[in-house]
Image (tube, rainbow, N blue to C red):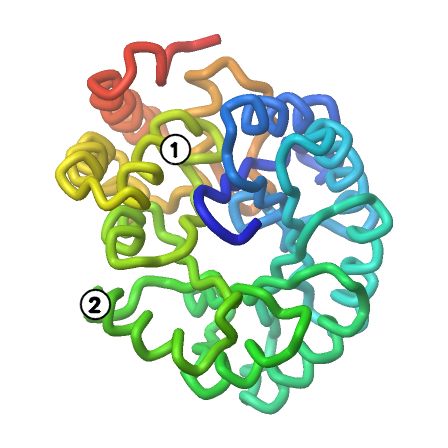
Amino acid sequence: MFTGLSAFPLTPMDSEGIVDPDALAVLVDRLATAGVDSVGLLGSTGGYAYLDRAERARAVAAAVEAAAGRVAVIVGIGSMRTRWSQQLAADAERAGADGLLMAPMSYLPLTSDEVAQHYRAVAGTTGLPLCIYNNPGTTNFVFSDALIAQLAAIPTIAAIKMPAPKNRDYATELAVLRPTSPDNFRIGYSGDWIAAQALLAGADAWYSVIGGLLPEPALRLTRAAQGGRQAEAEALDQAFSPLWALFRTYGSMRLIYVIADRLGLRVGDPPLPIRRVDDGVAAQVELALDRLMTIDGTTAHQG
């Protein structure tokens, strides 16, 4: 499940943080029908850090029911305490999730030993495979190559979700990481604007924000890159480029609400204090979506 396109949907909720399970079911059904390789539930785009245990459980139950075995559901279980993440892992397993994703959240900066112990403890809670979420932009923790190798040796830790390397040299980074991890350990990348480069370099997965709402063009890019069709993958990536630029400037989570509105999907509003973008930025998103019409005339239509 940690290969190909992992699509991360929003978690529809109201201003009080109450999850709308029916609206979430619609999003997951769209992704399963499109044929994504997995659904990344309760990732950063899904606002996991803003939801309590009960609302996360509501979201997992709704997503698993909507997926109905058609697509793997990977559930984010990052939290501020090891015990809470263990509870969330157990909740996800009972609800029928297929895998777990965890970032090392903390108020205080963590040491490598603390992060290692955190992952060992949570990975031992269930039999579900766990993906390391290496997201220094939100956690302020950077996984060293040595720590990744140490964690990859734990049987139930099956994958890692990586940020872009500073030099954007994906091939070299993969060449360093693969020899120190088991053969079945999967290395994927997040950051939609780097997906084509990472997949063409041999990454196993794209953990995608845009895939959560526009799975068809995201799948086309994924399959082209996986198949080594560089010219096709780069052309598709170029069609996405106005949107990627906006993602980098304003944050993809804020803009994904504009795209959901364009598609006529009920998603509520971002969890406060996160706010929607203003009308001027929304208009730029609309223009970027029009650019995607060059891929598929139905991609960004409302409905």
Q: Secondary structure at mark 1?
A: helix
Is residue 272 visible in the rendered image? The answer is: no
User: From the viewer's perspective, is 258 left or right of 113?
Assistant: left
Question: Residue 198: which numbered mark, if any?
Answer: none
The amino acid on which the numbered mark 1 sits, given as a three-letter code, is Leu
Residue in the foreground of this view, choosing between 217 and 24: 217
**Disc 1 and disc 2 in contact, CB within 8 angstroms:** no
**Position in image of residue 265 (x %, y %):** 54, 18
**Position in image of residue 72 (x %, y %):** 64, 42
Q: Residues within 10 Å of mark 2 (few under 14, many from 20)?
A: few
Question: Is residue 22 shown above or below 149?
Answer: above
Q: Secondary structure at mark 2?
A: loop
Question: Is residue 249 shown above or below 137?
Answer: above
Q: Quadrant of residue 179?
A: bottom left
The amino acid on which the numbered mark 2 sits, given as a three-letter code, is Asp
**Position in image of residue 57 (x %, y %):** 80, 45
User: From the viewer's perspective, is 149 left or right of 169?
Assistant: right
> How many angstroms separate mark 1 from mark 2 (CA)?
23 Å
At 47% from the left and 28% from the top, the residue drawn is 213
Q: Of label 1 and label 2, which has the lower sequence position? A: 2
At 30% from the left and 31% from the top, the residue drawn is 281
At 32% from the left and 79% from the top, the residue drawn is 176
Residue in the foreground of this view, choosing between 102 and 188: 188
Residue of label 1: 219
**Position in image of residue 282 (x %, y %):** 33, 26
Question: Residue 169: which numbered mark, if any?
Answer: 2
Is residue 56 visible in the rendered image? The answer is: yes
At 55% from the left and 85% from the top, the residue drawn is 150
User: From the viewer's perspective, is 228 left or right of 141?
Assistant: left
Furthest-right residue in view? 94
